[in-house]
Amino acid sequence: MDLALVALGLVTLLVGARYFVGGIAAIAAALGAPPLVIGMTVVAFGTSTPELVVNGLSAARGSTDLAFGNVTGSCIVNIGFVLAVTAMIRPMRVEPSLITREIPMLIVACLAIWVFGNDRLLDGAASGVWSRTDGLVLLLFFSIFLYYTARQAMSARSDDAFITEVRGEAGRAARPRSLWIEAGITIAGLAGVSIGAQITVDNAVNLARGLGLSEAVIGLTVISLGTTLPELATCVMAARRGDADIALGNVVGSNIFNLLGIGGLVSAIRPVPIPDSGQPDLLMMALLTVVLLPVAIRSQRTITRGEGVFLFVLFAAYLSWRVSSALAG
């Protein structure tokens, strides 16, 4: 029953997030906001809104293990599942801007959040924790990244995959509806996000207790797989229409947002102790992130089907080991 309610909450959350972000973008377009700002907002927040709301609510309620599991798990799932499946559908060409801009920033974000979570190893502390200070530093990094990306976007080539996606989202936001209709859609989407997040978090905690698993494992598996469905749908559709390079930008951008934006916000709301079993999750997240750069550079800057299979096998093996270890423990 708890699993069914988690699924119901996730569906409500995902549908609500879609209409909420779309409504906000349309209102901004109607009020004359610059298309670049609108497009970047939708690209940055669109597919990551479910993680943002679930983790923010989890932190506010004290379920920090669930938030930790979802922050790390979403990044693992994005690379090992979403990106891998997309590459298996269609090999993806890697834009130079991803190699020089987004992927290096993702590696920096991953290393930062790994360092912040290793107080025990680096400082001899009793346990690791993402403190409020760590959260503010992550949010500062995220602000710098958004500013730098906006500056780069203004002078980028018209065939840059990121700019193409931004312009497409801005065009979809400028739809011919009245401001009142868009306001109604936005409010309905916000209600869906709020209700869906509450149902998801409440029943995820109950599910963890019922199965004898930690909240971190539930966040790493059930919640992460559920909240990354927008990324999966977006990337698969992009691959099917021949825009797999945009799919890679979606995954990398979403992970940067998860680590710096959501990780920073969650830690600023409430310090997040690193669970005793959380270090392998941080290491796996770091491994997949660091491996992504050589994978992107190889084969004439193309992520091949074989490399997609490699990432997927790595992900599936780790997830199987993580769940079996949790059940055995």
Image (tube, helix red, strand yellow):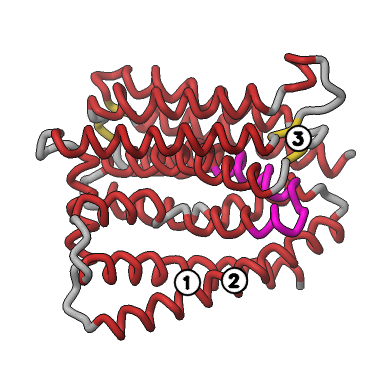
Majority SS type along the magenta span: helix
Q: Are marks 1 and 2 in contact (CB under 8 Å)?
A: yes
The span from disc 3 to disc 1 (Cα, nearest Å) is 30 Å
Q: Is residue 64 magenta?
A: yes
Q: Where is residue 45 drawn, in percent x and y?
A: 41, 53
Task: Give the secondary structure at mark 2.
Answer: helix
Residue positioned 49% across, 21% down in the render: 290
Residue positioned 31% across, 79% down in the render: 182
Q: Where is residue 194 drawn, in percent x and y?
A: 58, 71
Q: Earlier in the sequence, mark 3 or mark 1?
A: 1
Q: Is residue 232 magenta?
A: no
Image position of 263 with respect to 41: above or below: above
Q: Which residues are magenta?
A: 57-74
Q: Which residue is mark 1?
A: 16
Q: Earlier in the sequence, mark 2 or mark 3?
A: 2
Left or right of 103? Residue 58 is right
Numbered-mark total: 3
- Residue nearer the viewer, 100 or 329: 100
- Residue nearer the viewer, 232 or 14: 14
Left or right of 130? Residue 226 is left
What kind of residue is marked 3? Ile
Q: Which residue is mark 3?
A: 274
Q: Which residue is mark 2?
A: 196
Q: Quadrant of the C terminus?
A: top right
The span from disc 1 to disc 2 (Cα, nearest Å) is 8 Å
- Residue nearer the viewer, 143 or 61: 143
What kind of residue is marked 2? Gly
Q: Quadrant of the N terminus?
A: bottom right
